[in-house]
Image (cartoon, grey):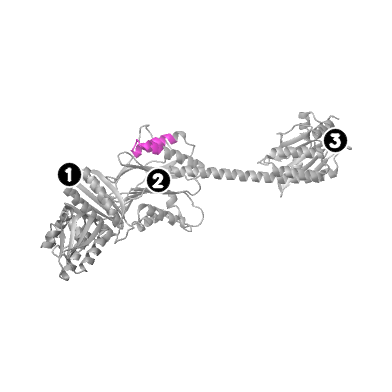
Amino acid sequence: MKHEIRETGGASVVAFEGDVDLETSPTARKVLLDCVGLKRPVLVDMSEVTYIDSSGVASLVESLQAARKTGLDFALVSVSEAALRVLQLARLDRVFTIHATIEEALGG
Amino acid sequence: MAERESVDKLLSESGENISDHLELLALMGSDFASSRDLETTLAKAVERITRYLDAAGGALFLLDETGKKLRCHACSGATEIAGMVLDSDQGIVGRCVQENVGEIVRDVSKDASFHGGVDAETGFTTRSILCAPMSVKGERIGAIELVNKLGGDGLFAPSDLSVLQGLSSSAALAIVNARQAEALVEQERVKRELELAAEIQRSLLPEARPEPFPIHGINVPARTVSGDFFDFFEIEDGTICFNLGDVSGKGMNAALLMAKTASLYRCLGKTITSPGKLLAILNREICETTTRGMFVTMVGGHFDPVSGVVRLANAGHEPPLYRRRDGTYTALEAELPPLGIMPMAGPEEDFPETEISLEGGTLYVFTDGVTEGYIEGDETLEVEGLKAMLDANADMPAADRLNAVISRIRQTEGPLRDDLTLLAVNDAGPARQAVGVGLLRINFPSLPGKLKEVREAVTGVLKEEGCPAALQADLVLVIDEACQNIIRHAYKGSTEGEITLEIRRDDDDLIVLLRDFADTVDVTKIKPRDLEDIRPGGLGTHLIREIMDEVEITPLPGNSGNLMRMSKKLE
């Protein structure tokens, strides 16, 4: 798994690429919680996520809860089919705000 | 004066002229020290002594191994009597050896002990004899005898005897040394050959296979070579032939018969799986060719890891022990005598077979070296002790369990009483869900970093099976989640654990089997979390149950791990 963080329109955009699994999710978790700590809205670009497991999903849930605590927006953007399937199976597709594109996310 | 001439001739031929007996002693000493060929050196010594003491002839007699015969090993001068054998008390030389005293017999015709046979045979006329015994530390070896003094008055002088006694002592010492050196060389040679034989024997034993391979064995020879053996080998249909035997005796003859029996079984076992038939063939062969009085007790078996069924035939061997999953035992008695004792009544008659379904239990086959092995003092392990050891180590992998039993016996001081051989046939029981066709079977360590490889392997197999892409992804997720649960919960994050993944297909059903070797998990504590309660963690089990049709976790007997079985219909 690789990741990239950039700032767009006042939000932190974290893009993950590759497999978010038991081996890589600790990194994903740290990256996400660090972004939440920056006190800016967090957008997670999941277009290049080829695989995500429950530990990866758990990192997303934990970061969402941390963002909510401080009143920050936390949304997922262009979620790949593979990742969306796992969110659906976990019934989390409605818990997360999911946008089709970064533009849509910023516009909303 | 013909005698005189022949010695002069000898002297001139050798070109030597020895002036005193110390010089002669030194020469003989250096000959004995430098030569490896005792007989040649002795011949040379006799020749020198004969010449130095100016005798017409000389001979060196040695007692044979029995001590009852004297044999002429070297001679010089007048008569050729090398190889002549006398009784050890025959003649003047015999008396000299028996009494261990040197003698001068000035006129043999006046000595009753004189054995005229030699003269009669050789045409030589013996007038006087000088004879000195050879002995070292009281051990009689033989004697050196000289005949007919050539110079002076033709009689041996007392000074001749003391010289001869000095020379014969030196020769005796050299002979004893040479014999000891020879014995040592022979001992070394035998030892080396035994070691080579042991090496060949070890190569006849099968290579140990890691779990989950069901059959494990151990052999510890009491001496260099062993009369015990065991073997196992897979045949094409995935079933496994095994055997364990004990040849009567422990020496090289037992080792050779062991090699023969084991080789025959392995060779024939590739095509004949029935152990009863195999033992009958071996029995005929051994009865036909073996040395009288040697026999082999043997258990032959055939194990099907898919059904967990063992077929056994027992030729006079210690009853194998079947340990059920609940820890109870049954001993399986032999029905026929050992191999090599008597041919079966009919040439086509087979040994009777017993069939048992192991149902998750283990079959132990062992030699009496194990049950009769000393544990403390005079106390032997016995069958009850063996059972106790197997019970105490039931949680360990089979190979470790066998080692534990062996180490219990070997702790006692001193050499082993008998060869120790032990074999276990471990039935996986519930892990043996071997229905349908195997698609994948892999072992991997409990490392998060290994999971990507596992996912790739699973994806490859599912693609091959024509599984739709969406279902592929779901199944990969399920297997990954199940492995994570094993790593995080069963192994508690330890990366030292091992996981076996097996995927099978039975018609439309895809069956996933995951086995760990961790402590038994409390199945009641594994439940999917309440999804309304949104929190990180605990999602894996939910995902698994969401996707799969059936999920079942079974703790394996004896705290030997857990088996997770999942199935999914492939539409």
**Mark 3 vs 1, N-terminal side:** 3
Q: Chain of mark 1?
A: B
Q: Foreground mark, 3 or 1?
A: 1
Q: Nearer the viewer, residue B549 or B386?
A: B549
> Relative to residue B461, is residue B312 drawn left or right?
right
Question: Residue B207, image x and y in percent?
Answer: 40, 46
Q: Distance of mark 3 from mark 1, alpha carbons?
A: 113 Å
| Position of the N terminus of chain B by quadrant | top right
**Mark 3 vs 2, N-terminal side:** 3
**Which residue matches tag 2?**
B207
Q: Residues within 10 Å of mark 2 (few under 14, many from 20)?
A: few
Rendered residue at 89%/37% (across/down): B153
Q: Foreground mark, 3 or 2?
A: 2
Q: Secondary structure at mark 2?
A: loop
Instruction: Inspect the image, locate mark 3, and give the three-letter code of the amino acid beneath it.
Output: Leu
Q: Secondary structure at mark 1?
A: loop
Image quadrant in which you'd find residue B435: top left
Instruction: Inspect the image, locate mark 1, and give the three-letter code of the amino acid beneath it.
Output: Asp
**Do the numbered discs 2 and 1 sit on residues whose CB atoms are within 8 Å?**
no
- What span is colored magenta in the figure? B264-286
Q: Distance of mark 3 from mark 2, alpha carbons?
A: 76 Å
Are tags 3 and 1 found on a single chain? yes
**Which residue matches tag 3?**
B150
Question: Residue B391, image x and y in percent?
Answer: 35, 57
**Which residue matches tag 1?**
B508
Decide: is B539 above or below B467: below
Main secondary structure of the magenta stretch: helix
> Relative to residue B476, is residue B403 drawn left or right?
right
